[in-house]
Image (tube, helix red, strand yellow):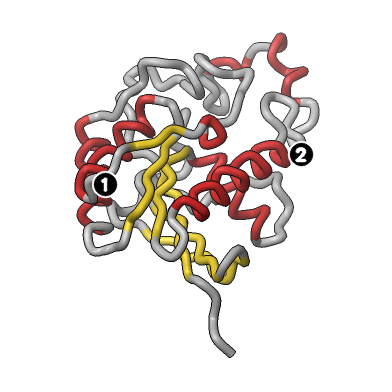
Amino acid sequence: MSRGTRTVVHLLRHGEVHNPEGVLYGRMPGYRLSERGREQALIVAEALSSHRLAHVVASPLERAQETASPAAAAHRLDVATDERLIEADNQFEGLKVSVGDGALREPRHWPKLRNPLLPSWGEPYLEIAHRMLGAVHAARAAAEGQEALCVSHQLPIWTLRRYLEGRRLWHDPRRRQCSLASLTSLVFEDEQLVDIVYSEPAGRTDPKVTGA
């Protein structure tokens, strides 16, 4: 039996962000890559240099656009923008949320924590998974028979992966397998997902990095 057309969609988490205040920056504008983050973007571009990238698309946020640029330039492609790749909405945006520090110590914020399975403090996990899946299938169609690169954010990428693997969507953020500048690669035969491959071309980072 002949196999279908193979297409790979790489989900790339953006590189390290300059965030000296240590806030959860979420969708806030103005948060760009740090010097290390720019280096990570170059490392990923080099790792993908021999791949058949035919389409590069990113979240509209600055850090994602900057991370996408080196890989797109190496393949002489423009960086497209897809709003569905954006960071998850979060009511703690702009605040420090470390345990024992910042917003979580203030009683006025406690009602936001009433349902961590949804979660009640932000965009529902299922909505994140559905929009991300739509973006992935659009990228797959654009790069049919080759490879696409989608630059997004930790929670959306990890939520989609859990959804595709049939796991519950609520989870411990400390156990996410989605380091800075990591690749979660979805392998398709025609429109069917046949494999998920995770790699860290720029090395492993703590998954608890704030506002990722």
Residue 40 appears in the rendering: no
Q: How far apart are marks 1 and 2 (CA)?
A: 36 Å
Is residue 69 positioned above or below 110 on the image? below
Q: Which amino acid does label 1 sit on?
A: Ala
The image position of residue 147, as x and y in percent, is 39, 59
Sequence-first tag of 1 and 2: 1
Please tell me in which quadrant of the rendered image residue 34 appears.
top left
Contact? badges 1 and 2 (CB < 8 Å): no
Q: Residue at x 44, y 32 (%)?
A: 81
Q: Which residue lies furthest to the bottom in this view?
A: 1
Q: Residue at x 65, y 58 (%)?
A: 164
Assign the N terminus to one quadrant of the image.
bottom right
On the picture, is 151 further left or further right than 72? right
Q: Badge 2 is on which residue?
A: 117
On the picture, is 84 further left or further right than 40? right
Residue 137 appears in the rendering: yes
Is residue 38 positioned above or below 161 on the image? above
Dot 1 crowding, Cα within 10 Å, few <14, some 14–19, many 20+ = many
Q: Depth-wise, is mark 1 or mark 2 nearer the camera?
A: 1
Q: Badge 1 is on which residue?
A: 71
**Front residue (pair 132, 160):** 132
Q: Which residue is drawn at 62% across and 16% down?
A: 105
Mark 1, secondary structure of its residue: helix
Q: How many labels does the image show?
A: 2
The image position of residue 32, as x and y in percent, is 31, 24
Is residue 45 positioned above or below 19 on the image? below
Q: Which amino acid does label 2 sit on?
A: Leu
Please tell me in which quadrant of the rendered image residue 128 appears.
top right
Q: Residue at x 71, y 60 (%)?
A: 166
